[in-house]
Amino acid sequence: MDSIKIKDLKPIGVEDKDIFLKYFSVQGRMSCECNFASLYSWSSKYNFSWTEYKDNLIVYGALEKALLMPPGKFPTVEEITSLAKKFRDNDLGAGTIYDVPDVYLARFPDVKEYFDIQCSEDQNDYIYSTSKLCRLDGKRLRKKRNLIKQFEHEYPNFKCLPLSASNKEAALEMAMKINAQLPQGRFIDEENHALQSAFAELEQIGMEGVVLYAAENKIAGISVFSRLNPETFDVHFEKADHNYKGSSQMLARQVACVLHNRSKYLNREQDMGIPGLRRAKKSLDPIYMYKRYTITLKEDIG
């Protein structure tokens, strides 16, 4: 891949969706990073750019100065080393490639001779059984069932409606209001931009969602998701108003019930090392964690 031309990289546009979907379908990874809607939404902050090269898609994030693991045909060790060197030699980072799946490292063990390999628990994706979340099976979900019953008792006229043109403005306003109440920092700033980008092009980028109402015009929560692969949906944004007790549990269940006939799994993405978010995601009883690795070209590889 040493002949790839850096100048061919271009920003991600709505019109590029089909090209991305074509390459993402090759490996069918469970990773939330392999999702066009997500890349498009977060591109305003991460400054993603892309180009096609041979049998693959090259995606570069300027903010982190790192490449997405090519989602098409797995590159050989020689090819991925050449790709990393090309970007490093052009002062586009240290030759870092993120979201490398464990299956790649198992298939190409020699990669460790050329790259330093890291894996952070903060970056693992939480994968759930859609039907289990809908039914709320098992002892570990007993507290969730109780909180949902409390929500149903307190708000007997609740509704869960599809995210649509008629309610998306109010849904976005609610999400931004929730974020304004959280400790401010880089992640909240980036998510606010991602939310605005996503809501501006929901249908065009393949996103859909639900809005949970505790009562008429009283939004208790929103969830936005898109298809990740034939068996999985990716939950990109989920906001619940905790003034409505049980809203987050009810919302998670409603999403699962809406999608259980369309998917076996839900990817509810990473916890980013945020303690409260980690507790919440673990409490929903994931069936496994999708581990992603980051590899960086060793300094002595010339």
Image: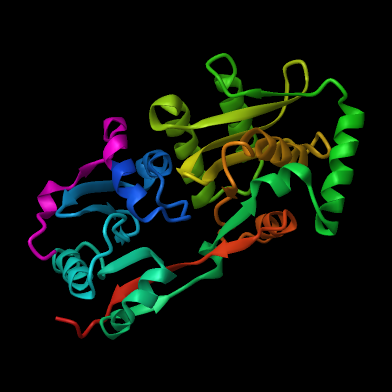
Q: Is residue 12 magenta?
A: yes
As drawn, is 251 to the left or to the right of 71? right
As drawn, is 204 to the left or to the right of 169? left
Locate residue 6: give its quadrant: bottom left
Where residue 294 appears, as percent x and y from the top left, is 39, 69
Where residue 192 appears, as percent x and y from the top left, is 50, 38
Residue 36 visible in this rendered orientation of the protein? yes
Q: Quadrant of the C terminus?
A: bottom left
Locate residue 27: give its quadrant: bottom left
Where residue 164 appears, as percent x and y from the top left, is 55, 19
Identity of the residue drawn at 61% across and 63% down:
288
Where residue 3 appears, as percent x and y from the top left, is 7, 61
Q: Quadrant of the N terminus?
A: bottom left
Nearer to the camera, 49 or 243: 49
As drawn, is 92 to the left or to the right of 142? left
Residue range (magenta): 1-19
In the displayed structure, would residue 44 be above or below residue 87?
above
Residue 200 visible in this rendered orientation of the protein? no
Identity of the residue drawn at 22% across and 71% down:
76
Identity of the residue drawn at 27% across and 30% down:
15
